[in-house]
Image (spheres, coloured by chain):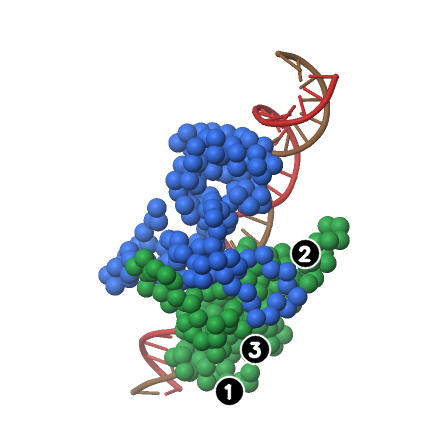
Chain colours: A blue, B green, C red, D brown
Amino acid sequence: MTLTDATDLLRGAGLRVTEPRRAVIEALGGLPHASADAIHAKVAQALPDVSLQTVYNVLRDLTGSGLTRAIEPGDHPVRYELRVGDNHHHLVCTRCGAIVDVDCVVGHAPCLTPSESHGFVLDEAEVTFWGLCLECQAAVTTASDPVPAHP
Amino acid sequence: MTLTDATDLLRGAGLRVTEPRRAVIEALGGLPHASADAIHAKVAQALPDVSLQTVYNVLRDLTGSGLTRAIEPGDHPVRYELRVGDNHHHLVCTRCGAIVDVDCVVGHAPCLTPSESHGFVLDEAEVTFWGLCLECQAAVTTASDPVPAHP
DNA sequence: GCCTTTTTTTGAATGATTCAAATGAAAGTC
DNA sequence: GACTTTCATTTGAATCATTCAAAAAAAGGC
């Protein structure tokens, strides 16, 4: 994810090109499935004055334009990912909130359609596999361990 | 959902039988996909002294025992449903949070398995169809309407 | 009925996310 | 390149679903 890529993405979406926005996009390039807080920390390495509020604003705008996608891992903070060539799903750890991509089971979009739409106008089918990641499996068998941070 | 049913469910799960717990189960019988707040309101009709905190406690216990299931409709409050014969999915309105059941696309559990588990021990595959319900379609076309309450 | 364990209550705290007003920067125009 | 308008960012505070904690009350086994 180079500077030019981020700029082009923003231009293509009709969004103004600003340093914080480019920085957030670049951060997501290196941190797939990052929370607003994690993105803020990453962005702060290059731009220490960018506020967490700005990161929230940027993520709202990027998501509204379809450049990023929000993932809600249960009761953990929302995670964001660059919406690259779609059609993948997520493995989510119910304990620590870690997220891993998995290829689409079917292989083409839309990979699923409901048997009845009940009048809904649908725009996405989301498949989430809930489970326990390797780290948390180990932690659960051991006596009560703290929940690990997820990178 | 009769009193006896609720009692049996609790006994079967090894949970103590209390008025608030029976009331929550009965409320869920009449209100599928209800939020803690909505359940509290329903329960209060019969038992006005049951606190919202108690409803949260009960829902935590019921969900922990597998009697109910939590659904997280994006940025809306968590909804709960009685876990009846499984294998159905959800249509969720991104605007108002309304939830409708849809039959499983595949028809038998587990209806999906990921192509790779990445070491995760999985316990559930969740399929969510995101869209706009009938009411919200109408509201969006009309000039900015308030978000409707969902029953 | 008594005793222990589990629930409920009450009241306050938490924390991710959002709102609002004021300042600052981007992009189009002359 | 400066001007103007529009949009983004900052700062600080507010929201609200959900959880924590301590004390009082009820459930179930003996």
The number of discs equals: 3
**What residue is disc 3 on?**
B29
Q: Is residue A143 left or right of residue B150?
A: left
Secondary structure of residue under mark 3: helix
Q: Chain of mark 3?
A: B
Q: Are marks 2 and 3 in contact (CB under 8 Å)?
A: no
User: Label 3 is placed on what type of residue?
Assistant: Gly
A138 relative to A45, above or below: below
**What residue is disc 2 on?**
B147
Q: Which label belongs to residue B13?
A: none
Secondary structure of residue under mark 2: loop
Secondary structure of residue under mark 1: helix
Q: Are marks 1 and 2 in contact (CB under 8 Å)?
A: no
Label 1, label 2: how far apart the Cα atoms are? 38 Å
User: Label 1 is placed on what type of residue?
Assistant: Thr
Q: Is residue A104 left or right of residue C4?
A: right
Camera-side mark, 3 or 1: 3
User: Label 2 is placed on what type of residue?
Assistant: Val
Q: Which label belongs to residue B4?
A: 1
Rendered image quadrant of residue D2: top right
